[in-house]
Amino acid sequence: MTHLTLMYFAAAREAMGVKQEEVEVEAKTVLEVLRWLYRNHRDKLVPLVMDEKGRLNREYRLLLNGTECKRASFGRVHLKDGDVLVLMPPVAGG
């Protein structure tokens, strides 16, 4: 089991109903955490944050301990106890 802090912003926070949560998951990679989120919160996250197949929507970014994770590496980025995963919504500018 891995102890993580999951943080949500903007619409993802509204959908989840919390700003952050501490979770214990059987996940070793970022991809496995996304699968866990899909299994446990599908009704809240689809279609806003994830698609029907559990993939993170293109507009969203994922930060691990403040560093962006590239989609191609989700399955290779390993987690450790105490990591903080952040779902970042699209950034609007002007």
Image (cartoon, rainbow, N blue to C red):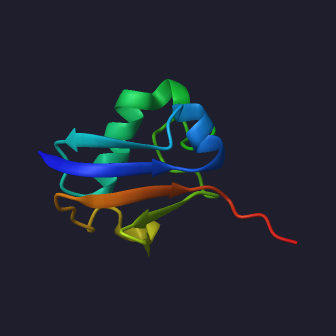
Residue 41 in picture, x, y percent from top left: 43, 30
State left or right for residue 44 relative to residue 91: left
Asked if residue 46 shows in the view, the reply is no
Residue in the image at 34% along x and 59% along y: 84
Image quadrant assignment for residue 22:
top left
Q: Which of 41 and 65 is in front in this view?
A: 65
Image quadrant assignment for residue 40:
top left
Residue 31 in picture, x, y percent from top left: 32, 54
* Residue at the extreme right: 94
Residue 57 in picture, x, y percent from top left: 58, 51
Residue in the image at 50% along x and 43% along y: 19
Q: Which of 23 and 31 is in front in this view?
A: 23
State left or right for residue 73 relative to residue 4: right
* Number of marks in the rendered image: 0
Residue in the image at 36% along x and 30% along y: 39
Asked if residue 48 shows in the view, the reply is yes
Residue in the image at 38% along x and 38% along y: 37
The N terminus lies in quadrant: top left
State left or right for residue 60 relative to residue 23: right
* Residue at the extreme top: 43
